[in-house]
Image (tube, rainbow, N blue to C red):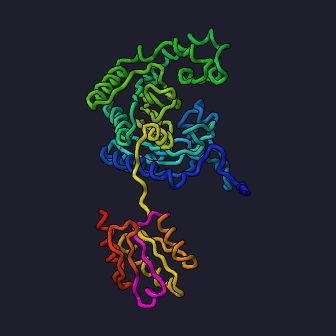
């Protein structure tokens, strides 16, 4: 047997979502749309690429996204663009560009969007991945922080994910945080020569990111580092308390994580992640986010509070499979038109059109193949009914309606009545 090796393959870090996986994707997107509706979020779609400066400003020049992971290119007009690496700055740009600040506040938006990051590929983590993204712009309320956490929790709940936990933290506001950052630098300074290269670089540029490191060289020092959660400003502490109370009222379990800072520079106050509990992959976040009150202003707008989250659909699907969640298969064509008579192709297409007009899926067989081969193809397609147009039927202007599972008797009807007869046969299965 000769094995054919294709000349081209999907680029490293990308994947083809084949038909057998589409039911999972459909389930996630349908659940996201429904949960968003229940909480009053409206859909927005932003471009696949933006000005690179949007993410350099928005995500922070010390984030991994900007330092290592963006796909940046110059187009023919000389503009420096980037494939969208994360959704929040793009949605904030749209908020400013389209004057959403004049809309009733806050503005609740959601999207499902392809993201592009030049990251090390691993299971559930691709260089092109798709995120569910929700943002609430225009409210500083701690109740809104709890709301976005609940939206994400209810999405996972709807999709049948189990054994998850919310990890909750606070990184205070930029002003009060300065004293803690100085304290953090004093703690880390004697250990600089033992840290990873990334942490050494971040020590001066963004010391808070030292707590976000997953490098094994940094972990012992991270665990013993002073905790910001223990010295929050009064305003941030009150805000945090209200978030916790709201989550408790919603029945959402959480644990406080004093080391949680998230990987993007724009966050303040509430930060959170949802991870598998009692799982060896617990470092692998399914979704997370937080408050980012200064981002709109960084992008050139007025001071505008905001909070949101992102969650990768590929990662969600891995958890659905781990939890053995059953998903409904996507519908298959109910009818297969078998035709063999010379000149019958016109009648076959007409029959198919009449059925599709009634919302019934149809595949028209290849008339060059034998009747037996076409009936076998009908079964392989999962069709429920076969319309058989042989030489005798074609000559008489009739068609045989055959229930492939034998729930209804095989009948021969005029072609003009075939669509109604098929509907009756399908109704027996409902």
Name which residue lies at 52% across and 41% down: 86
Q: Is residue 68 visible?
A: yes
In the image, 41 versus 55, the foreground residue is 41
Q: Horizontal and vertical percent for residue 356?
A: 40, 73
Residue 280 higher or lower than 360, as above or below: above
Which quadrant of the figure has residue 185? Answer: top right
Q: Is residue 306 visible?
A: no
Residue lying furthest top? 190
Name which residue lies at 64% across and 47% down: 80
| Residue 357 sits inside the magenta stretch | no
Q: Horizontal and vertical percent for residue 157?
A: 35, 38
State which quarter of the image contains the C terminus.
Answer: bottom left
Name which residue lies at 31% across and 43% down: 39
Residue lying furthest left? 249
| Residue 383 sits inside the magenta stretch | yes
Q: Which residues are magenta?
A: 380-399
Which quadrant of the figure has residue 308? Answer: top left
Residue 73 higher or lower than 138, as above or below: below
Residue 316 higher or lower than 47, as above or below: above
In the image, 200 versus 55, the foreground residue is 200
């Amino acid at each position: 047997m000769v094995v054919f090796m294709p000349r081209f393959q999907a680029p490293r870090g990308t994947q083809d979502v084949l038909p057998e996986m589409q039911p999972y994707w459909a389930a996630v997107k349908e659940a996201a749309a429904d949960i968003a509706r229940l909480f009053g979020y409206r859909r927005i779609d932003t471009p696949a690429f933006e000005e690179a400066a949007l993410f350099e400003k928005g995500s922070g020049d010390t984030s991994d996204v900007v330092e290592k992971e963006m796909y940046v290119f110059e187009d023919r007009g000389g503009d420096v663009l980037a494939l969208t690496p994360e959704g929040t700055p793009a949605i904030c740009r749209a908020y400013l560009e389209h004057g959403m600040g004049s809309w009733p506040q806050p503005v609740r938006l959601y999207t499902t969007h392809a993201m592009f990051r030049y990251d090390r590929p691993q299971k559930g983590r691709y260089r092109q991945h798709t995120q569910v993204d929700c943002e609430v712009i225009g409210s500083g309320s701690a109740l809104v922080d709890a709301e976005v956490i609940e939206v994400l929790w209810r999405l996972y709940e709807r999709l049948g994910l189990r054994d998850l936990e919310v990890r909750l933290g606070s990184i205070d506001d930029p002003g009060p945080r300065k004293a803690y950052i100085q304290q953090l630098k004093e703690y880390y300074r004697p250990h600089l020569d033992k840290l990873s290269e990334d942490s050494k670089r971040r020590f001066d540029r963004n010391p808070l990111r030292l707590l976000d490191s997953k490098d094994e060289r940094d972990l012992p020092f991270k665990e013993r580092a002073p905790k910001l959660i223990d010295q929050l400003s009064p305003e941030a502490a009150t805000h945090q308390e209200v978030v916790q109370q709201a989550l408790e009222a919603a029945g959402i379990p959480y644990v406080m994580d004093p080391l949680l800072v998230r990987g993007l520079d724009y966050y303040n106050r509430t930060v959170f992640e949802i991870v598998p509990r009692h799982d060896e992959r617990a470092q692998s976040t399914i979704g997370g986010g937080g408050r980012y009150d200064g981002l709109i202003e960084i992008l050139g707008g007025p001071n505008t509070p905001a909070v949101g989250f992102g969650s990768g659909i590929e990662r969600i699907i891995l958890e659905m499979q781990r939890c053995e969640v059953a998903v409904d298969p996507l519908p298959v064509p109910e009818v297969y038109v078998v035709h063999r008579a010379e000149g019958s192709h016109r009648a076959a297409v007409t029959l198919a059109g009449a059925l599709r007009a009634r919302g019934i899926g149809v595949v028209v067989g290849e008339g060059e193949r034998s009747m037996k081969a076409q009936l076998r193809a009908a079964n392989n397609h999962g069709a429920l009914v076969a319309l058989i147009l042989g030489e005798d039927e074609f000559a008489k202007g009739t068609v045989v309606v055959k229930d492939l599972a034998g729930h209804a008797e095989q009948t021969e009807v005029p072609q003009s009545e075939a669509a109604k007869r098929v509907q009756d046969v399908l109704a027996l299965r409902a």
